[in-house]
Amino acid sequence: MAEPVDLPSERADALDPPPGLRELAERAPVSRLRFSDGQLGWLVTGYALGRELLVNNQFVVDPVALPLGDAEMIAEIDRIEKSTPESAGVLIMLHPPQHTKIRRAAARHFTVRAIAEQKDAIERIVSGRLDAMEEAGGPVDLVTSFALPVSSFSICEMLGVPHADRERFERPSAVLADPHLDAEQKRDALVAFYDYCRQVVTVKRSSPQADILSDLASQGELSEDEIVGLARQLFEAGHETTAAQLSLAVVTLLLDRARWESLRADPTQIGNAVEELLRYLSILQMGTFSRTASEDVELGNVVIKRGERVVVSIPAANRDPEKFPDPDELDLARNAAGHIAFGHGRHMCIGQHLARLELEVALRGLIERFPRLDLAVGVEELRFLGGEHQMYSVETLPVVW
């Protein structure tokens, strides 16, 4: 067995995973990994074994165990998170039967059919943001002018809150996601976030409307704390990841004009292109949340001992040549079905269909309204947030048309 490694995080190219991940994957699909607190665990880079692990109930989610970052800070934030009564509704922190209960209550609102009903609203949001861009004139920052408001306004519509509330969840989400801020700042952000969510749920109980939170509040299946915790996760995950994915997708397409033009010539390709972009970019750069083995488990030719941690590298698994031939090639016609950009198993992203719809509608709108859209600066001037950030993204994206 090779010596333990730290999770590779240095990228040679902005849109490709760290070369070190490929080197590990070529050596073996499971490698010894050193976590941020110094403990040894395992890193899965192979697609088949990654999917196998994510559906194996002998592994339990362990959000505090991160491969990169300040271990003391991570542990302190975990302690703060778990001390709040609202944590009873935060899906990623839960195990069955509590996880099953919360997810089942929310899942009916996130089916393909239910999300399809949001298409008109998302199209209106996209059109409105494109109008604002056109009125402002270029250059504009596509992240703050388009990607972030489209995703934030879409989750506002789903949860039945005014668009003007976006700062009430965007700001604390940004603080919680920033690996460079201290525990006190994150604690204050979490308190403010839960205060906002509780205010929203209180309003939904007294004045229900046709939205997810009103339905959950009226059904009586979940306690108020559970609904507040779930609301926090939906607000947080419902805007950050989609905005990051959309921004990176635009960068990727603009760096190869032929791909942009192919989608312009045949917009029916956009749905399939979204799946390939999800696979290719795989923005959850640290991989899935870690799992801990509840008993000895054999995975491939490795035995993961009870109590040991393991994490699946989504960027590596989604570029496994055994599943995706020529994986480093962005092929917009590829059948990328089966990618694990949204995870897999019981912790698979509950909002994946909403994210897909937003990405498709937003890309179509951009291409139709601004067919000559282009970067206003060289790619070398863009700042990509990698390293200890769990989610890979571009900080700003100046564009002209």
Image (spheres, rainbow, N blue to C red):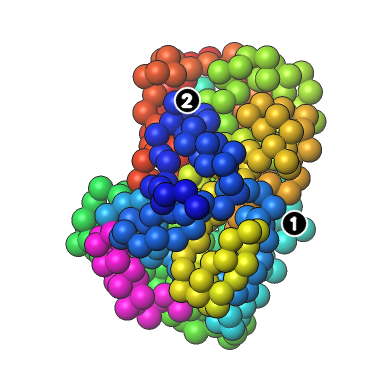
- The residue at the point 44 percent across, 26 percent down is 12
Residue 40: image location, x then y, percent? 40, 60
Residue 108, can we see it? Answer: yes
Question: On screen, 174 above or below 362?
Answer: below
As shown in the figure, which amino acid type bears the numbered disc 1? Answer: Val
- Front tag of 2 and 1: 2
User: Which of the numbered marks, if any, corresponds to residue 112?
Assistant: 1
Residue 265 is inside the magenta segment: no
Name the foreground residue: 360 vs 14. 14
Question: On screen, 206 above or below 46?
Answer: below
Residue 80 is inside the magenta segment: yes
User: Which of the numbered marks, if any, corresponds to residue 13?
Assistant: 2
- The residue at the point 51 percent across, 22 percent down is 134
Total numbered circles = 2
Side (left or right) of 62 relative to 107: left
- Of helix, strand and loop, which one carries label 1? helix
Residue 156, can we see it? Answer: no
As shown in the figure, which amino acid type bears the numbered disc 2? Answer: Asp
Choose the circle earlier in sequence order: 2 or 1. 2
Residue 318: image location, x then y, percent? 63, 43
Bounds of the magenta span?
Answer: 71-94
